[in-house]
Image: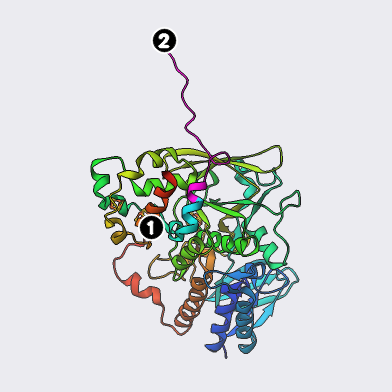
């Protein structure tokens, strides 16, 4: 492609009306504690996968709620299901259950 | 002879403090500018966080007024007041005069006029309403419908409208609107279980007892959604729905969403009566335009004028629970004053500098 010295940037805006929120709806239905997440980030702070990669359960729960699924689908397998996050979550989110349900939708 | 106290403003604070002052043995006259007692509470159906009926609290307050034989004057339009040798004379428009040894000001708040936050389209778009209007729908048993007459499928709720906002001149937090948003979200879901509810907030200020539990219930039981970010603007779609724009600060991305109905959580401002009575009695106002108390920690019911006291939201936003507590505190402060135990002597005697901020 000819380099014209400029490019077209992708729209970064979350288009809530168009986004597909079916993964979030599925997780919500089968693991209702998904609703309780307040994005505090305690899970991510304790997570070993988070320490060495971009993986963040806090972020992925939020992105699914907005229907921004791509990043989640690409990364959810990095979770080792160790359950450390479940020990620290202040809202009692069944984090491993949430991750299982997400994985079910991502294969 | 019984000492006399005049209470100005017949909302929650005025009613409860009148009842307590009467119980303490004073002759109490309660002046109310409208035609009945109860203030804003009359416009509220259920109360956070317990969902009990607002009218139960009105009944409780009315019983206090009756038991105490408080002299209630409705439609009272005060024109002037003078102070002479620790005695006050208060003049009404209808040429009656009331004498008092102390005055308690309980002139309360007005709701923020959402038109002033014009980027949210209240008064411009048909499907933008206020929290007070939504409450009116609940109170009157009406259906929640859009301007087009349909049941809304998605409802947006905007926190901090006319609060925490330099643009509107109201930099303080109104305290009650976060939990009101949670309460009203649940009430919407009770009526419209299939509707989606989205609250747009900056911080969830769930400070009161049981507020956090209500917030949890909204999420767990009712599936209410919370998006952290302050709306930049709202505009109307061709079908009459409202397109909102917000930075989803947790996702780190801008977001746009159509809602069928947008509810603005309007904040609390010093009432017109607070301004009028304040000028008349030479009372000092703080930077937030509420009355300035003699000290923020210790003299919260004491004004700059000897013999004049405050209770309720005329000194700043308060919940009903806090207003009732404050009303009783004011009654006790006045009793101290009228029996010669002036509580401000304690602090004046020491070298503590009164902080002048509020
Ligand atoms: S279960 Fe997954 S998300 Fe939770 S701490 Fe372990 S690796 Fe991290
Ligand atoms: S610790 Fe729990 S509440 Fe906090 S972000 Fe993680 S899942 Fe959500
Ligand atoms: S209580 Fe909540 S909505 Fe109301 S002003 Fe404070 S932060 Fe904003």
Q: Nearer the viewer, residue B202 or B30?
A: B202
| Mark 2 burial class by Cα count in 10 Å: few <14, some 14-19, many 20+ | few
Residue B310 in view = no
Which numbered marker is on residue B275?
none
Residue at the spot of label 2: A3
Q: Are marks 1 and 2 in contact (CB under 8 Å)?
A: no
Describe the element under mark 2 as helix, strand or loop: loop
Q: Nearer the viewer, residue B331 or A38?
A: A38
**In the image, farthest residue toward the front:** A107
Please state the horizontal and vertical placement of residue A15, each as a whole percent of the image: 54, 37
Left or right of residue A36: residue B238: right
- Magenta extent: A1-24
Please state the horizontal and vertical placement of residue A81, each as a whole percent of the image: 29, 53
* Residue A33 painted magenta: no
Left or right of residue B249: residue B312: right
Residue B339 in view = yes
Marks 1/2: CA–CA distance = 48 Å
Q: Chain of mark 1?
A: A
Q: Chain of mark 2?
A: A
Residue at the spot of label 1: A97
Q: Nearer the viewer, residue B271 or B333?
A: B271
Please state the horizontal and vertical placement of residue A11, each as a whole percent of the image: 49, 29
Q: Between tags 1 and 2, which lies in front?
A: 1
Ligand 1 is within 8 Å of the C-beta of the residue at disc 1: no
């Amino acid at each position: 492609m000819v380099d014209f010295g400029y490019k077209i940037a992708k729209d970064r805006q979350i288009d809530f009306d168009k986004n597909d929120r079916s993964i979030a709806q599925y997780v919500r239905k089968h693991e209702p504690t998904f609703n309780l997440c307040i994005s505090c980030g305690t899970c991510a702070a304790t997570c070993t996968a988070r320490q060495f990669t971009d993986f963040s359960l806090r972020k992925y729960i939020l992105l699914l709620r907005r229907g921004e699924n791509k990043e989640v689908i690409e990364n959810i397998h990095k979770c080792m299901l160790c359950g450390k996050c479940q020990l620290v979550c202040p809202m009692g989110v069944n984090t491993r259950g949430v991750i299982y349900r997400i994985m079910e939708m991502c294969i | 002879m019984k000492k006399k106290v005049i209470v100005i403003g017949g909302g929650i604070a005025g009613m409860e403090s009148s009842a307590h002052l009467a119980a303490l043995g004073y002759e109490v006259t309660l002046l109310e500018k409208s035609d009945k007692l109860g203030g804003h509470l009359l416009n509220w159906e259920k109360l956070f966080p317990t969902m009990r009926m607002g009218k139960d609290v009105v009944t409780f307050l009315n019983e206090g007024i009756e038991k105490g034989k408080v002299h209630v004057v409705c439609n009272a339009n005060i024109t002037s007041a003078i102070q002479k040798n620790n005695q006050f004379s208060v003049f009404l428009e209808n040429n009656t005069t009331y004498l008092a040894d102390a005055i308690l000001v309980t002139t309360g708040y007005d709701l923020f006029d959402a038109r002033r936050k014009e980027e949210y389209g209240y008064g411009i778009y048909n499907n933008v309403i206020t929290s007070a209007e939504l409450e009116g729908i609940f109170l009157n048993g009406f259906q929640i419908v859009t301007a087009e007459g349909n049941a809304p499928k998605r409802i947006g709720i905007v926190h901090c409208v006319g609060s925490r906002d330099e643009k509107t001149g109201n930099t303080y937090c109104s305290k009650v609107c976060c939990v009101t948003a949670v309460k009203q979200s649940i009430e919407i879901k009770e009526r419209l279980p299939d509707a989606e509810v989205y609250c747009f907030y900056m911080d969830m200020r769930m400070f009161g007892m049981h507020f956090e539990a209500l917030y949890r219930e909204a999420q767990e039981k009712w599936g209410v959604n919370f998006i952290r970010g302050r709306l930049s603007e709202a505009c109307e779609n061709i079908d009459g729905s409202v397109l909102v724009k917000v930075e989803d600060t947790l996702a780190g991305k801008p977001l746009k969403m159509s809602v069928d109905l947008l509810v603005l959580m309007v904040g609390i401002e010093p009432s017109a009566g607070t301004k009028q009575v304040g000028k008349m009695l030479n009372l000092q106002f703080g930077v937030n335009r509420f009355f300035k108390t003699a000290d923020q920690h210790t003299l919260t019911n004491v004004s700059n004028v000897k013999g004049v006291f405050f209770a309720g939201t005329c000194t700043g936003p308060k919940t009903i629970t806090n207003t009732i507590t404050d009303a009783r505190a004011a009654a006790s402060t006045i009793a101290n004053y009228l029996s010669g135990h002036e509580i401000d002597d304690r602090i004046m005697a020491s070298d503590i500098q009164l902080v002048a901020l509020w």
